[in-house]
Image: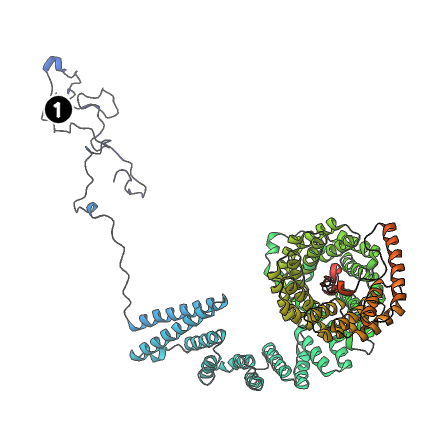
Amino acid sequence: GAAGGMPGAGGGPVAATNPFGGFGSAMGGAPEGAAGGAGFGAPAGGGRMMTGRMTGRVGTASGGGDGPRPMTSVKGAGYQSDPSSAKPSFDPLNQAARGPAPKLAEKADNSPEDLAKEMEKQVNALIEASADAAVSGDAVQALERAKEAGKKERQLQKHRESNGLVDQINLDLTYAVCFNLANAYHLNGMFAEALNTYSLIVKNKQYPQSGRLRVNMGNIYYQERKYPVAIKMYRMALDQIPNTNKETRLKIMRNIGNAFVRMGQFQDAIGSFEAIMEGNPGFQTGFNLVVCYYARGDADKMKKGFTQLLSIPMPTADEEEEEEEAKGDEDTSERARDSLREELKERQKKATRFITMAAKLVAPVLDRDWAKGFDWVIEALKHDHDMIASEMQITKALTYLRRKHFDKAIEVLRAFEKKDQAFKAKAATNLSFLYFLEGDIAQADKYANLAVRHDRYNAKALVNKGNCLNEKGELERAKELYLEAIGVEADCVEAIFNLGLVNKLMGIYSEALQAFEKLHSIIPNSPEVIYQIANLHDQLGNYRSATKYFNYLIAKVPSDPGALYRLGQIFSKDEDETQAFHYHLESYRYYPVNLDVISWLGVWYVKSELYEKAIEFFERASEIQPSEVKWQLMVTSCYRRMGNFPKALELYEAIHKQYPDNLECLRYLVAICKDLGQKFDHYEAKLVQLERQHAKHVSATAAGGGGGGGGGGDGNWGESSGGSDGGGRWEGGGGGVGGGGGGGGGG
């Protein structure tokens, strides 16, 4: 086309030209000398063309010269701006009306080979889907996809056999399908099916490397605790793995050693682990070997094994990376995402953990003097593992603490004052706790301040500081610190318990109850927490809830006399005398010296007119408190109520000799002597004299109850006093308000 040009002889495009030559307007001619040459109709002699005024309109066919002129178009050539009037493009086959050509149809792959290839792709896709599900933790989905892959693979084999393509059967694909299915069975806990599938694979001689799968079979037997069969499978797998594959062989040997440990055959396990340590020592194997030596009780071998464990080089970065870290450059986001660096850190963490556990295991048993064992371990660690050595020193201090050697514990912890700040803070937390236990609040406060100053987010240090403030009576500030400790560590049980106690001391029972109920959700089996909840419900008058929680408490500690007594008191307030008597009697059975319980039981028997039983309890109380006259008066009153006046008179006279100024005794002596017809003048004179002295004393002190004797008589048959708050037994909780410090490694 003219617009695009056509190749010329020289290979370049030919310019678009006017096919009719140059001309001016169709109504006239171009002036002479125009670019198109002489206009059409110019006279031969070059004369002027005639105009319309002279001749009328001249047709374009007529000329001014001799001969006829060809017909031309009356329209200009070129692009038409009006699409309605534009001439349609040249399209003799009407292809524009058909639209774009359809997509070429794919070649039909209907040959048996092509179908087999397509089915093989589907099997591979199902295997990959099963593996993805297994990695993501969806074992059920993994098994479903594995079964589908097995079904599809069997269809593929039948297709190839029926179409004479047996030579194209893919054994590797069959192996992968069976292996994946067995693994899926294993993940779902279907051990019998997994073992059956593995057996089919290892018995098939067409799979040369299938013997390695006996390791997987051994793992299943290990999970089923069939350790002898597991060891057999591991050894069969070991026989089929060449010596060149050293690392895999050593891992299987470690499995054999672990199975021997489970069976209690420590000597055989030691043989396996020692062989591994000679070939390719590792931290996990070294730790297992130390555990076996510990189980055998061989101190010398424990030292040897621990030294071997320390001789294994720690996983470290190469020299260039160490230099970069030494420069202190900030980690970039790329370095932060470095998976190799994360793997290195994880290996270092595991190595440190194995060494620390081994040190804590063997240190107390290396020597008859456990402290010397700790010293040996700490000295061995100082060369290459100084941080672990410092941690072992804190463990040594805590061991002193457990053995009640507080002075030695303080001495060890004080040695950290010149060490690294982190260990100094840990030591300060434990020192604060120790001094608090000893009652040295000033020193406890000093070290608590040191620990908090170093790390404001140390919940144990905040609890210790709060305990010191609580002892000083600064309850509000103590409460603030307990709340701060809970903010740092939401499940810090010491902080929550002490918050409940301090709210209880401040009389805010609803908040105290809220704190203890939260703690109960964290540690539901703690008797101390259950007691506090029951006690608060009792104080708030919620007797039904109090009964419920005291029953929980008795279920946890059925022989606790304080809880039984408190439950008996609640039933007594609720006027359920039968249940109240039962729980008071149970409390007396476990703790027969609680005077509140004895008094209540004695009064209950008197009300029931069982005076002989009441006498037993009052005599028991008199033995516990021989200097308290009221118990003897109660015994005598029981005899008097029984009508045994001679015995009552005898006892009253004995009491009068021991306590000659007791008004109650004299009153009953006068009354009994009158009833028995005996002389009572001297008793009556003494009674009048004592009453006058008593009246003078009362008027002088202006107090209504200051007299000499002790009440007694029938006035003592009322309800006994409420008594102690459960004997104070549970009030302390986990160390009471001092339950803050302790803990391994600083809390």
Image: 103 above or below 46? below
How many marks do you count on the picture? 1
Image: 510 above or below 24? below
Q: Residue at x 29, y 43 (%)?
A: 7
The image quarter containing residue 75 is top left
Q: Amino acid at mark 1?
A: Thr
Residue 488 in view: yes
- Place of residue 598 in the rendered image (x, y in percent of width and height, measured from the top left): 74, 70
Task: Please name whichever residue, 712 or 304, is drawn nearer the observer in this view of the structure.
Answer: 712
- Place of residue 243 in the rendered image (x, y in percent of width and height, measured from the top left): 59, 82
Task: Please name whichever residue, 734 or 432, is drawn nearer the observer in this view of the structure.
Answer: 734
Residue 400 in view: no
For residue 472, side relative to residue 283 (left or right): right
**Residue at the far front in the pictured view:** 677
Task: Please name whichever residue, 275 or 320, is drawn nearer the observer in this view of the structure.
Answer: 275
**Residue at the far top in the pictured view:** 53
- Place of residue 401 in the rendered image (x, y in percent of width and height, measured from the top left): 79, 67
For residue 334, side relative to residue 502 (left or right): left
Residue under label 1: 60
Indicate the quadrant containing the C terminus: top left, top right, bottom left or bottom right: bottom right
Indicate the quadrant containing the N terminus: top left, top right, bottom left or bottom right: top left
